[in-house]
Each structure stands twice: as C-alpha cells, then as structure tokens.
Image (cartoon, rainbow, N blue to C red):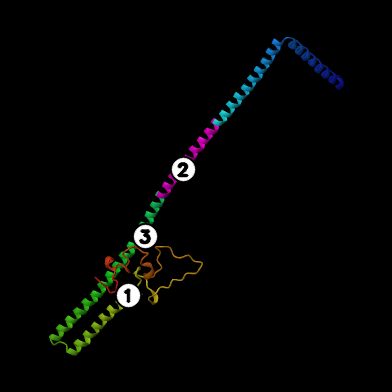
Amino acid sequence: MSSTSLDSLIEYTKISQDAELASAFNVLKSDPVKLTQFIQDQQNAIYNQIMTQKETSFDKVYGDLGRSGKVQESMLMYNKRNGELKNVREQVFMTQKEQADAILYDKQLSSRKNEMNEWTFNNKRDTLFVFSALFIMICGFILITVLWRLGMISSYVWGFLGVPMVIVFVLILVRRSMYTDNLRNKRFWNKKLFEGKVKQVLSSECEAPATGSFTGSPATSGSASTAGSPSTSGSSSGMPSSGMPTA
C-alpha cells in the first residue's frame, strides 16, 4: 500500500469519526436529559481519574517519606554506633596508654632506684675505706706509743713514724672529700665530671632534651630525676650532700 492511499485512509477515518461525533451530539442535543447525563458521566469519570491519580501520587509520596524516615533513622543509629565505637576505642587507647606509662614509670623508677642503691653502696664502701685507714692509723699510733713507752724506740722515731701516718690519713680524707664534692658525678658513682663542670651544647636545629632526661649536670638533672637524687636528698638515700664520706 502506497503512502498516498494510507494518507487518504487516515483522512477518511477522521472524517468518519467527526461525522459520527456530530451525529451523536445532534442526537444528545435533541434529548437534553441524555445530554445532561452524558456530561455528568464524563465529569464523574474525569473526577474519578483525577482522584485516583492523586491517591496514587499521595501513596507514592507517603511511601517515599516513610523510606526517607527509615534512612534518616538508620543514619542516626549509624552515627550513634560510630560514637559508641569511638568511645570504646578511646577507652582502649587510654587503658593501653596508662599501662604503657605505668611500665615506663616502673622502668625509670627501678633504673633510678638502682642508681641510688649503687651510689649509696659505693659511698658506704668509700666510708668504710676511710674508717679502715683511720683504724690502721690509730693502731699504728698505739703500737709506736707502746714501743716508745717501753723504751724500745726514741721519741724521734715515734714522731718519724707517727707524722707520716697522720699525713697519709689526712691526704686520703681530703682527696676523697674533694673528689666527691667537685669531680664525682652526683648521679652515677663511676662517672667523673671533667674539670668539675658539664657543658651542654645545643644547636638551633636540635630539640631541647625531654623532661626527665639526664644531661650529666647535677644542677640541671636534679629536678628531672626521681626524688632521692644525691644532689638534692643525700640524707634520705645515704649520699652526703657535702661530699664527705659518711657511715
């Protein structure tokens, strides 16, 4: 079938429909009751169609609103759960941090206690050495005095033997005292402060030493170390503050 015949058929169909519509309208126009009924039926159909569309749209919007509310509720619960997990993670972190700090503190405390015990022990050994020297000197004096009183030695020999013993003891006492006061490290017994001073050199790029670190100077490390440092609390740890050996 050609396009011309198809167009003619379409045109003929439109004319037939218009003719039928005009005929039906004329019939209805001749009967006002049927025309009114027809118009009422059309209005009812259009109204029902509009109401159906509105109900469908309302149901769709209401359903979307319900789903949106569910999504918002899920987001709120998700946020709440994230907050709970964050709190749990912070609690675990704080617990681990406290445990790590406690271990570090115990390690530093035990290390410092060991240093204090070592200082006290060696100081007592040094004191024992001084008292031993004193005891030997006294015993020597008693011996030469007894020999002098018995007439076995002269007073010149007594003085020749006694004076060196006194000089040796005084030298030992002064040497130990001066070494402990000026040259011995106030934290580590076996370390020496050269020239009696510790110089701390820091460049502009270097960071300052952290709190609690020891630089070797008793003036700067005494406050950072554990209580009982020999530079600040000699009486409590058995370490003399003046450097003199004590019992």
Q: What is the spatial separation of the Cα atoms under label 3 and label 1, in whole angstroms? A: 26 Å
Q: Nearer the viewer, residue 5 or 58?
A: 58
Q: What is the spatial separation of the Cα atoms under label 3 and label 2, in whole angstroms? A: 36 Å
Q: Position of residue 110 (x, y in %)?
A: 34, 59
Mark linked to residue 138: none
Residue 217 left/right relative to 144: right
Going 24% across and 77% down the picture, which residue do you hit? 133
For residue 214, what is the image quadrant?
Answer: bottom left
Residue 142 vs 241, above or below: the answer is: below
Q: Nearer the viewer, residue 200 or 134?
A: 200
Sequence order check: which comes first, mark 3 or mark 2? Answer: 2
Residue 53 left/right relative to 89: right
Residue 198 vs 163, above or below: the answer is: above
Q: Nearer the viewer, mark 2 or mark 1?
A: 2
Any magenta on residue 228? Answer: no
Q: Sort mark 3 into few (<14), some (14-19) or many (20+) by Cα contacts within 10 Å.
A: some
Q: Sort mark 1 into few (<14), some (14-19) or many (20+) by Cα contacts within 10 Å.
A: some
Q: Which residue is mark 3?
A: 108
Any magenta on residue 70? Answer: yes
Task: Find the magenta span and give its range.
Answer: 66-94
Give the dominant element type of the magenta stretch: helix, strand or loop.
helix
Amino acid on which the number 3 mark rests in the picture: Gln
Going 55% across and 33% down the picture, which residue do you hit? 68
Mark linked to residue 83: 2
Q: Which residue is mark 1?
A: 181
